[in-house]
Amino acid sequence: MSKLDKGSKIAVIGSGSMGAGIAQVAATAGHKVCLFDNHSEALDAASGKLTKIFNRLVEKERITRSEADSILARIEFCQNLEDLAGSDLIVEAIVEDLEAKRNLFSHLELIADDNTILATNTSSLSIAKIASACSKPHRVLGIHFFNPAPLMPLVEIIPAVQTSGDALVEARNLIDSWGKVTVIAKDTPGFIVNRVARPFYGEALRILEEGIADVPTIDWAVKELGGFRMGPFELMDYIGNDINYVVTETVLQEFFYDPRYRPSFTQKRMMEAGWLGRKTGKGYYDYSEGAVNPKPTEDKELGQKVLHRILVMLINEAADALYLNISTREGIELAMTRGVNYPKGLFQWADELGLENVLSQLETLQKLYAEDRYRPSVLLKKMVKEKKTFYSENLIEN
Ligand code: NAI
């Protein structure tokens, strides 16, 4: 396996939002980077975007002109896949399409050295399935950056069942050396963040559909009373209702149709209408110039009800992820605070609210709706029975 260090040559495939960002991070960390895309316009766009970003960093005096020039000079915009030969680490960030990724990985084996580590930035696909397109799957793993890659500290590192311990250690150490916060996640749908965060959107949509509160009120409750930077609807509009919907649908399918992950018709219709959010000028909010959006009902009692319903569902999902060893307690706390900026780790929050209280809210919802969506995690039930908290000693005995 390639020993990865400052002198390692990095290649990135796909120069879209993620690929360009990952290339920026690697070049800033001192690596020579080869950025490849099979659309030359995408490469031109990435080059223009990176130049603009570095000009802005110079203007803001975050780096000097000569630093910016040398970082940019380290990025080579490559037109042929063969240019990637000799790379020590190749990170794939092409479209989220399993066949396209498998096809690319099987081609990469013909070009890459035997010791090159191959990584995918997929958000939702199985790493094992991508690795199985290779004859040497032990050097394949997931390295999942968040958007925008240069700004978001979290990187989920996902070994497939085939990944060797060496490849995992080399890749993780390298990404750590780039100043990122890495957490190891099991190769399961949505890894940590995209799994644990599902109720942030799903429960908010459910509250809206039931008419308990409207869009601005739910966002207000989550921000003002919960301390989140963005409300669920603002965030869905920011991510794009198409992207957010597709991730939910993929997670649902991948979880063998567990109803907990069932998407919402409201969001599906928004997507079908083309009301995708900020990028189309209209989503849950109107982003056109001079638009006046409705104001929230600032009713504290209603706000707390909304916030707590979303929060207990998030805590339940995090508890289940911990119970099923998707990651460690620290890994899940870091993932949610550093990957999606939650104001607090969900386990810390659970302890503050009281696990008995969290469990009882979930049980009330489950009784009321008689839906599996609200089934409490076995971990929560065990912990309440054993009077444990997430931050007490001897966390759980499975
Ligand atoms: P994007 O659509 O902005 O960029 C994809 C790029 O890949 C395009 O420039 C396209 O020309 C190129 N491409 C497509 N097929 C190719 C091939 N066979 N060979 C070479 N280049 C090819 O997509 P984005 O958003 O950058 O996502 C890329 C990957 O990162 C996806 O797997 C996505 O799930 C994942 N991801 C996306 C995040 C996001 O917020 N956008 C966050 C984390 C992961």
Image: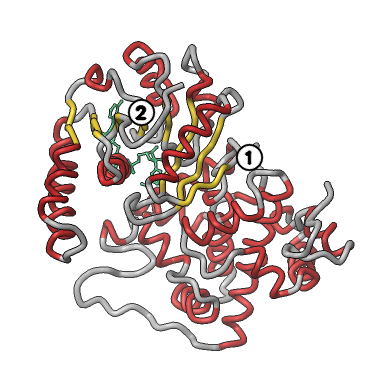
Rendered residue at 24%/29% (across/down) = 36
Rendered residue at 48%/86% (across/down) = 297
Q: Nearer the viewer, residue 21 or 7?
A: 7
As drawn, 109 above or below 126: above
Q: Which residue is mark 1?
A: 255
Q: Quadrant of residue 101?
A: top left
Earlier sequence position, callout 2 versus callout 1: 2
Which circle marks residue 90 in the picture?
2
Please state the horizontal and vertical placement of residue 357, each as a whole percent of the image: 77, 73
Please state the horizontal and vertical placement of residue 271, each as a whole percent of the image: 39, 52
Tag 2, which secondary structure?
strand
Please state the horizontal and vertical placement of residue 326, each as a whole percent of the image: 64, 44
Amino acid residing under circle 1: Phe
Rendered residue at 49%/30% (across/down) = 141
Which circle marks residue 241 in the picture?
none
Q: Nearer the viewer, residue 174 or 237?
A: 174
Tag 1, which secondary structure?
loop
The number of discs equals 2
Amino acid residing under circle 2: Ile
Question: What whole-number distance in Å separates the C-alpha atoms at marks 2 and 1?
Answer: 29 Å
Q: Tell whether 211 sits left or right of 98.
A: right
Please state the horizontal and vertical placement of residue 66, each as a whole percent of the image: 11, 51
Q: Nearer the viewer, residue 288 or 228?
A: 228
Q: Tell whether 341 sits left or right of 60.
A: right
As drawn, 391 above or below 268: below
